[in-house]
Image (cartoon, rainbow, N blue to C red):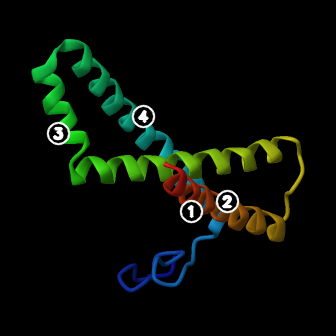
Amino acid sequence: MANVSQDNRPLSPHVSIYRWPLNAIMSIMHRATGVAMSVAAILIVWYFLALATGPAYFETASAVLTSWFGDLVLFLSMAALWFHYMNGIRHLVWDTGSSFGQKRVFRTGVAALGAAGLMVIVTLIVG
């Protein structure tokens, strides 16, 4: 066998030269937003349990959720919800067997991102 040095061989594909496709990024984000919304649901349940427990405990929960941190968490949860929803519609269309192909997958990804961004803005205006 040839004596091949393993020291200077690059990783394949190398992180610095490989660009992830939009579809891969959106797939990972779809899973991440699902987990993040579960955490947000736990915070909402905590809020309602604090309301049922008593005024002192509710004041603590209300102070946390109405602080800048709570506002940030609720905003990110709303954005995650809209992204997850729009990307879920995209997946439902794929379940019918249509909209496959490199160009269509990219276009539906951009459309889902745009629709999610638009719905975040509409929610902020209406809310």
Is disc 4 placed on a helix, strand or loop? Answer: helix
Residue 71 in picture, x, y percent from top left? 31, 50
Q: Which of marks 4 and 2 is nearer the N terminus?
A: 4
Residue under label 3, please give it.
63
Mark 3 touches mark 4? (CB < 8 Å): no
Which label lies toward us, 4 or 2?
Answer: 2
**Which residue type carries mark 2?**
Ala
**Which residue type carries mark 4?**
Ser
In the image, what residue occupies the spot 46% across and 83% down?
16
In the image, what residue occupies the spot 32% across and 54% down?
72
- Residue occupying the far front of the picture: 126
**Which residue type carries mark 3?**
Ala
Residue under label 4, please give it.
38
Quadrant of res 45:
top left
In the image, what residue occupies the spot 85% across and 58% down?
100
Of 48 and 96, the residue lying toward us = 48
